[in-house]
Each structure stands twice: as C-alpha cells, then as structure tokens.
Amino acid sequence: MSVKSIFKTSSILATVLFVLAFFLSVSLFRNLLRVRQVNNSLSQSKVILSQLEQENAKLERQLESIKTDAYSEKEARDKLNLAKEGEIVLVLPEEDVLRSLSPRRREEKEHTLPDPNWKKWLNLFI
C-alpha cells in the first residue's frame, strides 16, 4: 500500500467516525431532553396526586361526619323544622319584618367624624 492510499483510507475512516459520532451525540441530546420532560411531567403528576389525596382525605372525613346521627338530627332540625318530643319550635319572621317590628335604639344617630384639630384651633381663636 502506498502512503496515498493509507491517508485516503484513514481520511474516509475519520469522516465516517465523525459522522457516526455526530449522529450519536444528536441522539444522546434528544434522549436527555425526553428524560427531562418525563421528569417534569412526573413531578407535576406527583403534585397533582398529593392534592387529590388531600382532597380525598377531606371528603372521607366529611362523609364520616355526615354518617353520624348527630348530623342527621341537625339537618332535620335546620332544614325540615323538626323537633324532638316536648321541644318548642320558635319560627321568627324574616329579618326585614323583624327590624320593622323591633323598637328603635336611641343610639341610631348618624356617626359623624369629629372636627379636625386645625378647625378646633381656628374656632378657639375666632
């Protein structure tokens, strides 16, 4: 083999190796970007999962409190106006009607701000 053919062969081999290294580095870079995106997505999913678990726990506590007899009794009293035997139910009129029937307070004057200090001093010297 001549020196020329050796240089030509090594030049072709170097070019092939360079192209191969370039494609491998591009592939590696893309894979690293995908891994980063998946990690970000995983982090967001963990946050959402945590929030949903907290909400689920809150709803379970609420369900347990609703299942109690005390809650059923409270709802029957408040919404259905039911009472236990021997209790007296007092039904008040609407707030507007109640205000019109109640006696007026003497303190229902308009609250005005006191005069500013400069005005007091002015009145003192005039």
Image (cartoon, rainbow, N blue to C red):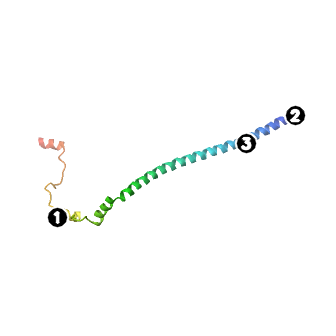
Left or right: 35, with 121 as reference point: right
Q: Which residue appears at 85% of the width and 36% of the height?
A: 5
Q: Position of residue 62 (x, y in %)?
A: 38, 56
Tell me the tag on residue 101.
1
Foreground label between 2 and 1? 1
**Secondary element at tag 3:** helix
User: Which mark is first along the chain, 1 or 2?
Assistant: 2
Left or right: 72, with 29 as reference point: left
**Secondary element at tag 2:** loop
> Gap in Å between the C-alphas at discs 2 and 1?
121 Å
> Gap in Å between the C-alphas at discs 1 and 3?
94 Å
Tell me the tag on residue 65.
none
**Secondary element at tag 1:** helix
> Looking at the picture, which amino acid does disc 2 mark?
Ser
| Residue farthest along the top direction in this orientation | 3
User: Which mark is first along the chain, 3 or 1?
Assistant: 3
Read off the residue under disc 2. Answer: 2
Q: Residues within 10 Å of mark 1 (few under 14, many from 20)?
A: few
Residue 22 appears in which quarter of the rendering? Answer: top right
Considering depth in this image, is 69 or 93 the residue closer to the camera? 69
Q: Is residue 40 visible?
A: yes
Quadrant of image for the N terminus: top right
Q: Position of residue 38 (x, y in %)?
A: 57, 48
Q: Residues within 10 Å of mark 2 (few under 14, many from 20)?
A: few
> Looking at the picture, which amino acid does disc 3 mark?
Leu
Foreground label between 3 and 2? 3
> Gap in Å between the C-alphas at discs 3 and 2?
27 Å
Read off the residue under disc 3. Answer: 20
Q: Is residue 90 visible?
A: no
